[in-house]
Amino acid sequence: MVRGGGGPTAALLLGLASYTATRPDDAPTTVKSGGSATPGAQQTGGAGAVVEEKTGAYPELEKLARRDAGDKLAVGRADAPVVMIEYADFQCGYCGKFARDTEPELIEEYVEKGDLRIEWRNFPIFGEPSENAARGAWAAGQQGKFWEFHAAAYAKGAKEKGFSADRVKMLAEEAGVPDLDRFARDMDGDEARKAVKRDQDEAYALGATSTPSFLVNGRPIAGAQPKETFTDAVEEALAAAGGSGAKKS
């Protein structure tokens, strides 16, 4: 169930964002093509889209931002004017592209200036290896190493090596997780499973069917879009919130 209400409209928005990528060319909704991955699909083309026209931001989706200062899977001030929620899978090639090419620049331009907060949601959709990586990411976060694990898991070539339980533990070591015995216990524990399921259920309740999927102050974006799609969304959200943003006039 989607927290904050909104009923069927909220539950369909991210599904709509993904669906519009395959609408007929004469459909009225304006989209920008991008990359996203769906379960069982070959990651060879632009399956994702961001719905811009007649969609915008939805207050019921904006309420999904947790803004928990103790959230170990988030970066940025809890009171930042803009929150980007990211639903992603570590086996998703498009998620990796976003993590390597776009996210670091958003962090430098907006997060470090206090304008943006990024909240990660584990959305494993490719089976057991994805579940392993998701629980490993959560476990790394318990020792303050989520983003280091995130970088290691999304490094070029990491996906091809797989995400068996043993491989995930190797990634934790690579990420500098200090207590690997605790990591193994946390990864295999009930709390990790509950945390991952919470994020996964939230994404499914929104109608998300592919990764990566995003909400920027309640505005749905699907796919590893060009950087400009995200900066435009952040700038618009900043303007609506009365912020200044990073772009020069």
Image (cartoon, rainbow, N blue to C red):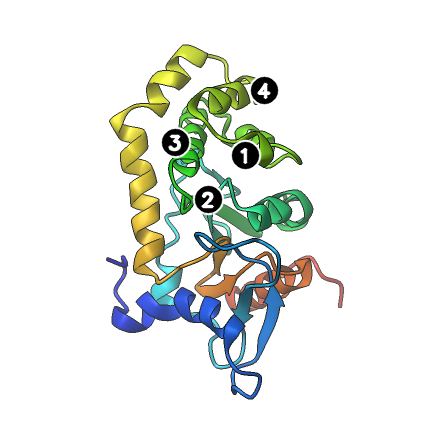
Q: Which label number is shown at residue 43?
A: none
Measure the alpha-carbon separation of dots 1 and 2: 10 Å
Circle 3 — which element?
A: helix
| Rendered location of residue 114, percent (x, y) | 58, 47
Give whichever of 27, 76 is nearer the camera: 27
Q: x and y percent of residue 177 in the render? A: 51, 18
The residue lying at 46 percent from left, 46 percent from top is 119
Residue at x 45%, y 37% (from the top left corner): 73
Instruction: Tell which circle, 3 or 2, labels the residue nearer the N-terminal end.
Output: 2
Kindly indicate whether the residue at mark 2 contacts the one at mark 3 (C-beta within 8 angstroms): no
Which image quadrant for residue 242? bottom right
Q: Are marks 1 and 2 in contact (CB under 8 Å)?
A: yes
Q: Secondary structure at mark 4?
A: helix
Name which of mark 4 and mark 1 comes first in the sequence: 1
| Residue holding disc 3 | 135
Question: Where does label 4 land, which residue?
Answer: 174
Q: Amino acid under label 4? A: Glu
Give the distance between the C-alpha atoms of the residues marked 4 and 2, in whole angstroms: 20 Å
What is the number of the mark on residue 150? 1
